[in-house]
Image: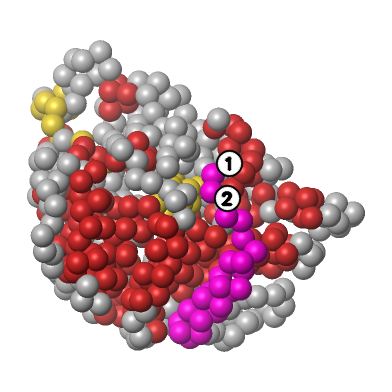
Amino acid sequence: MRQINIKMLLGCSVLLLATQACTDLTETTYDVIPTSGTFGSTAGQQAALIGPLYNGLGDYHGNMSNLNATTDEMIVPTRGGDWKDGDNWKRLYQHTWDPITDNGQFNGPWTWCYNNITSINQQLGTITDAKTKAELKALRAFFHYQAMDLFGNVIISDSVGATTPKQNTRAEVFAFVEKELLAARPNLSNVSGGAYYGRMNKYVADMILAKLYLNAQVYTGTPRWADVIVRTDSIIKSGKFQLAGDYLSNFAVQNQNSPETILATPFDKSKRGGFHPQMQTLHYLNQLTYNLGTAPWNGWATVTEFYNSFDDKDARKKQWIVGQQYTAAGVPLMDDALPMVFRPEVEAFEFAAGASGRLAGARSQKYEIQKNNTFTEQDNDFVVYRLADVYLMRAEANMRLGNMGAALPDLNLVRARAGMPAYTTITLDELLAERGRELAWEQHRRQDLIRFGQYNKAWRFKPADQAFRNIFPIPKDQLSLNPNLKQNPGY
């Protein structure tokens, strides 16, 4: 099944990715789309040409995951000399990033968006089939949406043209994304899964629109809560998706058949790499726990208070690893003279060398760790959008419109799956906490914190900061290339 899905999605793409350093987001082109000859003259051939363009969507996780270190759900402490990285992780976490020093951290996501937009524009010039064109325009809208969310005032690129395009306001990009998705939607497929697994269809378009409207007040100053309900209703009432019975099954090694997934990016440890959360979070000696071919890197953990926000009865708490660690044969592991016990407490951002610092912080096993894996990559597909988020978004929109009676059933569906008691009432702060528990490390937290007015508050090892940090700086490299670009205020 795994290979079938990869072939369905990626077509004739060359799916070889080189492992890169954990903070190097430099893009490399792996696919070449034919631009001449007679291939592509029929609707079927045109549809086949879009495979390589979806390869870029697969880099969503790689480009977004580092930026999750700017939130209160993820911390990358320095452990002796490990993960010092010029204090890169500390600046991200404390919201003190610098446009020049940290240019590479932001230039990676920027070029990811616009390299893919450019490739889509080049291909659109040869497309005559209405359905294929709609699918590509929806994919292009997704990349514009990501650029707008991260950087604010960005470029609308809807054709192959000027080398120094103008900069658009965030509100203008919002309007462009909305218009493109609404225009494309009638010609998008209503099939989910199968040949449309990991591709743009009506429900993915509805999801991007719902996210757009959910954050409309941040993006444009005008709330669009009723429109959130329209789009989430469309997804839920389609009957195409249902909550998986087991929360963690959504993230299993073989998770491509989850009934909850609206959009995922497929990975395969040998054919399409780029997904290795186990390497980023596990301790070096956990190689023996899971019989891995390579020792993990002992980096990413969750913030103590975030871990403590989970009730012990919450099934979602099982996504974190704490306590004594063992070999695959069940022998307790030791780190130097200390029992290898992960503790939730992260007492400092910078630890001295030694076992104590190496064991600080709960680690993530949300994405099932692939045992007996000789590759650093894993086979799990990364879930970009899923149904539980749709219920939570509809609940939030109803809450903000004062309709608690409509909000609570949606919230309690998600709670029930986690084995938690139903809410009888709820505050916005508690809703944010519930979103955190459900969607931890799925790359939604930064956006949520900003929408709830919490992104600039103080948390462990991070002082309060200013609101200009809610968008990232326009990368220095891009300012040098395009004199029409102006840096975001505050930078």
Residue, x 43% and y 48% (percent of image)? 241
Q: CA distance from mark 1 to mark 2?
A: 8 Å
> For the residue marked with disc 1, what is the amino acid?
Gly
Give yes or no for residue 89 being in the magenta stretch.
no
Graded by Cα atoms within 10 Å as few (under 14), some (14 to 19) or many (20 or more), the crowding at tag 1 reads some
Q: Position of residue 76 (x, y in %)?
A: 26, 51
> Element at badge 2?
loop
Q: Residue furthest right?
A: 38
Position of 47 compared to 352: left or right? right
Residue 153 visible in the displayed image: no
The N terminus is located in which quarter?
A: top right
Residue that mark 2 sits on: 191
Residue 90 in the image: state x and y as whole percent. Answer: 25, 59
What's the magenta region? 169-194
Q: Is residue 71 above or below residue 175?
A: above
Q: Residue at x 58, y 66 (%)?
A: 185
Which of the 4 quarters of the picture holds residue 36? bottom right
Quarter-of-image position of residue 444: bottom left
Q: Is residue 182 above or below residue 27?
A: below
Residue ID for mark 1: 194
Q: Amino acid at mark 2?
A: Val
